[in-house]
Image (cartoon, grey):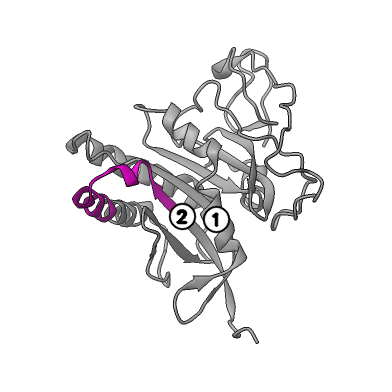
Amino acid sequence: MPARTRSSYYVIMVADIEGFGRRPDPLQYWLRERMYGIADAAMAASGIDFSGSPTPTDRGDGAFWLFPGTVPKVELTANFMRCLRAELRAYKQVSSADAELRLRIALHSGEVARDRQSWVGTDLNTACRLVDIAPLKSCLQQCRPAADLVLAVSQAWHSSVLRHNHPDISDDFLQVPFTAKEVRQNAWITVPGHPLPPGTVAGAPDTAPSPDADGGTEPDENSGEGGDESWPDLPQANTGRFAGARISAERVYGGDHNEGTGGRASR
């Protein structure tokens, strides 16, 4: 009989260091320490009350943080990311090219339980898979050297935060498919403080039915997950910052993407 665990609602943040496995061991130790230090400094600078948060949990080339449900998601998406970007920029000014620190961040929320060894829960699995999606990795590679931080948020996060068009969140978000094992939904990615790189691609097309905001749906057994699915016609951005860029995703959120037309894209 499975052991009984009691879950609690947490705001989940996952970080992953780009190119971690290519570094020699001493540099890996250094980068991990810097990642934790930079995250702590950004939390302190953000003014958000993170008290009551468990100690962050190691993931080898990254870590995850569980914050109480009282931590405001809008502030985490906006102010904390600005502070994290500033801390990474300050580190870059005094570090060598070999010791560069570039991060992918994922934000999600949900039920997580503690067992005798560590933390467990479907929502935690989703967050850890979200930080590794191909569009997010590609976005970080394409925005070099201007930016060292990219962010992905889950479909649930979009439903509770992004779609409400909060004025504090000024970054552009690109909707991309998020398909990983049992997860089949959408995600939204951004480069905090920067426009998305022109031609940012969304990865494999998502042909799954739209799940609810709290999680994914099981793949259709006849869909051939990972099979030969053709790209849909890609929308062409022809105004503003995205002029001429081919964006392989359904929507772009945030920013003024209709400059000169009198319109504004909606979240």
Rendered image quadrant of residue 9: bottom right
Magenta-drawn segment: 15-33
Crowding near the residue tagged with mark 2, few <14, some 14–19, many ≥20 C-alpha atoms within 10 Å: many
**Residue 11, above or below 23:** below
Q: Name the residue under label 1.
A: 127
The verdict on residue 26 being magenta is yes
Are circles 1 and 2 on residues that touch, CB within 8 Å? yes
Quarter of the rendering containing residue 112? bottom right
Quadrant of residue 231 within the rendered picture: top right
Q: Which of 266 and 116 is in front in this view?
A: 116
Name the spot of residue 183 as percent of width and height, x first.
66, 53
Q: Name the residue tied to disc 2.
A: 14
Looking at the rendered image, the quarter that the C terminus falls into is top right
Give the main secondary structure, helix, strand or loop, of the magenta stretch: helix
Q: Position of residue 131 (x, y in %)?
A: 50, 48
Q: Is residue 234 left or right of residue 157?
A: right
| 19 up-or-down from 36: above or below | above
State how far apart marks 1 and 2 are (Cα).
Answer: 7 Å
